[in-house]
Amino acid sequence: MHLRPTDRHDRMPSWRCGGAVVLAVVTDREGRWWQVTECCSRCAAATPGAQVVDTSPAVAPRTPPGAAPRPAGPRPAGDATAPPEQPSAGPVGVPQFSHLPVSGARASGARGSGARPETVPEPRSGPPRRRPPAGRIAQRYIPHDLQPAVLRDELVELGSRFRAYQQRSEPDLSLLADLHERKARAFAAWADVSGDINLRLEARRAEQAAATARAQHLQRTGESLDGTTPAVARVLTSPAQWDHARSVLAHVAQHSPLPGPDARLLTLMLTLRAAHSGQGNIVGQDVSSLGLTGPEELVEQLTGCGWLRLPGTVDDLFASRPENPTPITVPSLLPGPDGSGPFAFGRKLRPKLSGWAQRVISDKKLRKAKATSAVRLLALQLATRTDAEGHLDAGGQGIPLAAVSAWVATDADALQPMVDLLVRAGWLTDDAVLSDTHLAGRVGERVLPFTCPLT
């Protein structure tokens, strides 16, 4: 934007054009070419090789709208407020600057020949700026001219919904799955319109993300894939695994070398560690985390009676860490001459059974309720004696009281406080009833993944 000499330059930035209009000649260093240009004095001074030939005379300011026109004729002497006389076309060879008015025959001839008008039009404000994109989704800009408009609006809304979902304090997998499904359809339509293969690949990734989020939601809510029947994602997944879990509990109940719930719980965990070949590994944290009374003394009693063998002392066992576990041997679980042991399951199932039992006895709510070894043994027993819906015993009458007290290694009079604690911890529902002969009721909904239903 070139400024007129009468404009106030102090109000303009220093980088803007300004000064009087000049006629300059620009040449290269060798003088092989030259160019005549009309520009402002600032541009001429900043142009390398430019030489100013002539400077435009000052132009009087325009008459404001509504002001009275000045009388024609020569300016009176001493009238400082009268505008100066307009310059004429001048003799031949004198430059006529484009921003100055023309007069006389030259002006009339210019109008007839389509030349410049008397005044220069106001300069433009600059090239029009490009419109920003309509929005963003998946690190992609959505163009304003995307057609159809319904698709563009859907993409813009999806981008806003995804950003709002990221601000949530709690996840909603069902909502996330719906958003990914909408994104897959929208990106597939976008790919059809634009022919971009990357959009097609993004649509497929959205379909996979929707399926994953949907499956996670169904697993959390306990619904089946068709949404009609309940489906429980159990830790042990097949009836064969459930039978093996019951066989381990029955073996420990019959062959426990020491009396009492603490000794039985420790025997169970050591049996699960060495169930496949009679040998396994253990660290001190595995024993101390059981919450037993006098765990060091119990381990010494097990080694003293020959049920357990250690390569070192009991102190070495409790000082061992995961990077250097202690190998143990249970002679009663070693395979016989025919290569068979007391259990029929294979090497891969053993850690699953051990993990299942560990998750039950270390249940967060049971630990918070300060459950004793007897209570945790009862929780294990109840988990293996339910039907598919969680009712105790498949016949619906409950578990015989004699079987319960025999497994827990305590008398029947101590069962009622244990049942009350399991109800408070949510392991049993409020309708659990302990009669003189049976324990009836139902396990809680959160316990269903740990159950091994009777078939």
Image: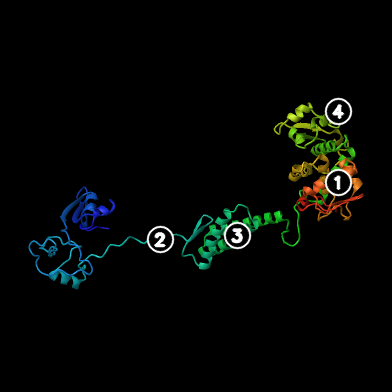
Report, in whole angstroms, how far the alpha carbon at label 3 lies from the one at label 4: 63 Å
Residue 38 or 345: which is nearer the viewer?
Answer: 38
Label number found at residue 416: 1
Neighbor class of circle 2 (other Cα within 10 Å; few <14, some 14-19, many 20+) is few
Neighbor class of circle 3 (other Cα within 10 Å; few <14, some 14-19, many 20+) is some
Tag in front: 1 or 2: 1
Q: Which residue is mark 2?
A: 130
> Residue 104 at x, y = what percent?
13, 70
Amino acid type, label 2: Arg
Report, in whole angstroms, how far the alpha carbon at label 1 lies from the one at label 4: 35 Å
Tag in front: 4 or 2: 4
Q: Taking the image as drawn, is residue 148 in sight? A: no
Along the polypeptide, which appears first: circle 1 or circle 4? Answer: 4
Q: Secondary structure at mark 4?
A: helix
Report, in whole angstroms, how far the alpha carbon at label 1 lies from the one at label 2: 78 Å
Q: Is residue 110 left or right of residue 255?
A: left
Neighbor class of circle 1 (other Cα within 10 Å; few <14, some 14-19, many 20+) is some
Q: Secondary structure at mark 2?
A: loop
Report, in whole angstroms, how far the alpha carbon at label 3 lies from the one at label 2: 31 Å
Residue at the spot 77% in from the left edge and 53% down from the top edge: 445
Q: Which residue is mark 4?
A: 304
Q: Secondary structure at mark 1?
A: helix
